Amino acid sequence: MGMTLTEKILAVHSGQREVRPGDLIDCRVDFLFANDITAPMAIKEFEKMGVENVFDPDRVAFVFDHYVPNKDIASAQQCKITREFVSAHHLPHFYDIGRSGIAHVLLAELGFVAPGEVFVGADSHTCNHGALGAFATGVGSSDLAAAMALGRLWLRVPESTKFVFTGQMRRWVTGKDLILKVIGDIGVDGARYGAMEFSGDALTQLTMDERFSITNMAVEAGAKNGIMEPDDVTLAWVTPRARRPFAVVRSDPDARYADVHEYDVSSMEPVVSVPSSPGNVMPVREAAGVKVDQCFIGTCTNGRIGDLRDAAKVLAGRTVHPQTRLLVIPATPAIYRQALEEGLVQIFLDAGAAISTSTCGPCIGGHMGVLAEGEVCVSTSSRNFVGRMGHRSSKVYLSNAAVAAAAAVAGKLVHPDEVVRDMVPA
């Protein structure tokens, strides 16, 4: 019996000919990282071990992205702890304010993860990197400390479920809509500790930005990891970036899956997750009319250049509704620079949006867009739990970037076609 993509990667990294779901393995790690929230906890556990050095300084990164620029003394202290550790251990891959971006976007952009690798991070959305054909998963800070010391981790091999997308993508439908549809169907625990393997000819129509959105949100279905087999688009994106030689891994034709779900994207339309769960999914037309106080375009899920381009298509020549706020946060400095060069930032400014340096910011209700009592936000982020972006009575609707931009213009939830009536359908 053959193995799935996830199983084959884990077999190689545990030095075994084959592994099966449920196996406990001692797994070699190719790269690991932590952010400004999780790094101090990992550092504390690492120092308690009495280990003098990390296993390989070239395979460890620290990225400041959650509460930066620092919003208060506590967040500044968190960063100080990490800076001191980085300095003491002479770690080369440290991304501080000005050089930093949202870790999941930045580290892929800089080539720190490649097909066939095992990549772990002290952040749940580390599964983002599975779009490159890597096994990528979030771990706790104590697990990260162990990996920092040993370059290895104990893992349980997850059971794989396949999601097959076929058909022709429609206008305004993106990778974000595909993954929201899946989560709406299987529920927020529908892939608990499983591997979500995404495939099908419809994926060839998606940019890497859209593919990252899909694997990024695998954890919202409870998955251990999300993953896709690399194709020509993947390899064209990753090859010039990769810092290490890599080997592409593919699922065996006779691999066994716990289940297979098939989707024809030809009938899909933009959707939203309504409060207060990523699993509460419905077509945006059915949620239309909800008054919106704030719209947010950014995060590790949808702060990439493709998302900013989609938003600019809607916002060009239009202005944000006078009773609505629009925040746009490019995920990395490179994306910010590209948006400047393409004139997207000018479009956002002309529309009346506020544009921020790269940070997670409002996504976790940290700063730069916290919601007040009863306020409603349409966000391109990944979670809309109670109190996620501010006051417990505030409400968050999850969407793609075009839907968020359309809501900003209309002051209410609408299908982008209701705002961009002058575009010829694709």
Image (spheres, helix red, strand yellow):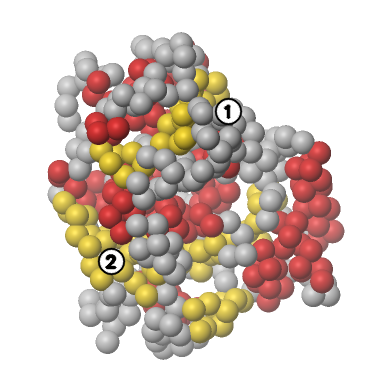
Work out whether 325 lies above or below 155: above
Q: Which disc is residue 244 wearing?
A: none
Q: Earlier in the sequence, mark 1 or mark 2?
A: 2
Separation (CA) of disc 1 from disc 2: 40 Å
Determine if residue 93 is in view.
Answer: no
Quadrant of residue 92 within the rendered picture: bottom right
In this figure, which residue is indicated by the disc labeled 1?
Answer: 372
Work out whether 300 lies above or below 378: below
**Where is residue 164 drawn, in percent x and y?**
23, 60
Rendered residue at 51%/29% (across/down): 374
Q: What secondary structure is found at the residue carrying circle 1?
A: loop
Q: Residues within 10 Å of mark 2 (few under 14, many from 20)?
A: many
**Where is residue 208 drawn, in percent x and y?**
37, 47
* Quadrant where the C terminus is found in the figure: top left
Quadrant of residue 305 within the rendered picture: top left
> Which residue type does callout 1 highlight?
Ala
> Which residue type does callout 2 highlight?
Lys
Work out whether 15 lies above or below 169: below
Rendered residue at 39%/18% (across/down): 411
Q: Residues within 10 Å of mark 1 (few under 14, many from 20)?
A: some
In this figure, which residue is indicated by the disc labeled 2?
Answer: 162
**Where is residue 86 drawn, in percent x and y?**
78, 55
